[in-house]
Amino acid sequence: MYSPDKMKSGGGLMAPPGCFPGRYSPTYRSSDPRRCVPNPSGDLFGGLNDGLLSRAEALAAVDIGKHQSGPQPGPPLPQLKHDMVYHHGVGGPPPHNTRPHQMGHHGMEGIDMLDPLTSSSMTTLAPMGEAAPPHHQLHGYGMNHVMNHHHHGGGLAHAPPAHLGHPSAALHPDTDTDPRELEAFAERFKQRRIKLGVTQADVGKALANLKLPGVGALSQSTICRFESLTLSHNNMIALKPILQAWLEEAEAQAKNKRRDPDAPSVLPAGEKKRKRTSIAAPEKRSLEAYFAVQPRPSGEKIAAIAEKLDLKKNVVRVWFCNQRQKQKRMKFAAQH
DNA sequence: ATGCATGAGAA
DNA sequence: TCTCATGCATA
């Protein structure tokens, strides 16, 4: 389960005054010109027989077979369509209108009607295979001071919700960490933002003009993720006060009709464009199969998988990292 | 809106 | 090496 505990531990809210979003320099290194190479030889599953891998391969093979070979009663393929659904299935959702998950899944492979078995067992509240790694760092991303506004004598942040999956669990006192509160805020935020006629990107940039200590600009991506609650719990909590501040400021200005005329928009001259590798569907399915049996493959395993799928090892490694992050993000929401 | 990626900090 | 916050590029 997630464990927002011990974050910002013992006053050590390391907030390097120079470390805030929107800082680093562009480090494009045109990593690799190679794109996705859809398994060339078709020898996707030859050789390499070591436990998990072969098991995963079987899954992957089946999956692939279902899509390119022919009809097969495919076994439970862990369909990791874990796209967060920030819904607290609990009893009385206090304040907020029911917002249907607004994730517009555009180009996703149409493989959702696979098997309700695995999906259900996962979406319920499965704490995922994570044995709760005892490390949580909430490193400096400048806005620490701000998010700091919630007391706690200097020790740990807030007591972790000692309940797990109890529908009627206790409502901890900390309103700032309450998922329902966050959800409600995100909803309000988006609504009011739109009312102001401001885009997500605008908000991101405007944040820098807020001059809040240690708060720089954020990207459209982040604002979007905040609104759609696709950030980690801690991330949501950290960003809330900042966005709230912006919202209030923006509405205040709107009311006064005073639109700041000075536009500091110094359009950054064009730079190298980073290219995004795109993993082809077949490879992706294989990766998902591997992930199902071993979310955290060793370096060698990764190398093996990479070679099999004819992908760069780093690409595979990053894929697993991102996969873990996704499966984990807002995971706690399911418990609330 | 989301996939793949970077980089800092912690293990 | 992993996690986590975050971003660029793109569907």
Image (cartoon, coloured by chain):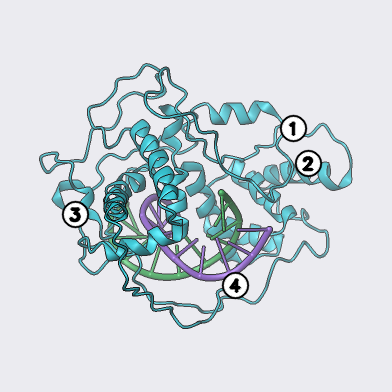
Chain colours: A cyan, B green, C purple
Nearer to the camera, A154 or A146: A146
Q: In the rendered structure, find residue A75 and report the number of the disc placed on it.
A: 1
Judge left or right: residue A79 versus residue A208: right
Q: Earlier in the sequence, mark 1 or mark 2?
A: 2
Percent coordinates x, y for residue A55 in the rendering: 69, 42
How far is the residue under mark 1 from the one under mark 4? Answer: 36 Å
**Residue that numbered label 2 is attached to:** A62
Q: Disc 3 on helix, strand or loop?
A: helix
Q: In which quadrant will I find the C terminus of chain A?
A: top left
Q: Earlier in the sequence, mark 1 or mark 3?
A: 1
User: Could you tell me the amino acid type at mark 1?
Assistant: Pro
User: Could you tell me the amino acid type at mark 2?
Assistant: Val
Mark 1 against mark 4, which lies toward the viewer? 4
Q: Earlier in the sequence, mark 3 or mark 2?
A: 2
Q: Disc 1 on helix, strand or loop?
A: loop
- The vertical placement of A263 against A227, above or below, is below
User: Could you tell me the amino acid type at mark 3?
Assistant: His
Q: In which quadrant will I find the N terminus of chain A?
A: top left
Q: In the rendered structure, find residue A145 and report the number of the disc placed on it.
A: 3
User: Could you tell me the amino acid type at mark 4?
Assistant: Lys
Mark 1 against mark 3, which lies toward the viewer? 3
Judge left or right: residue A42 versus residue A266: right
How far is the residue under mark 1 from the one under mark 2? Answer: 8 Å
Mark 3 against mark 2, which lies toward the viewer? 3
Decide if residue A277 is in sight here: no
Percent coordinates x, y for residue A193 in the rendering: 40, 49
Check the residue under mark 3 and report the chain it is in: A
Percent coordinates x, y for residue A14 in the rendering: 20, 58
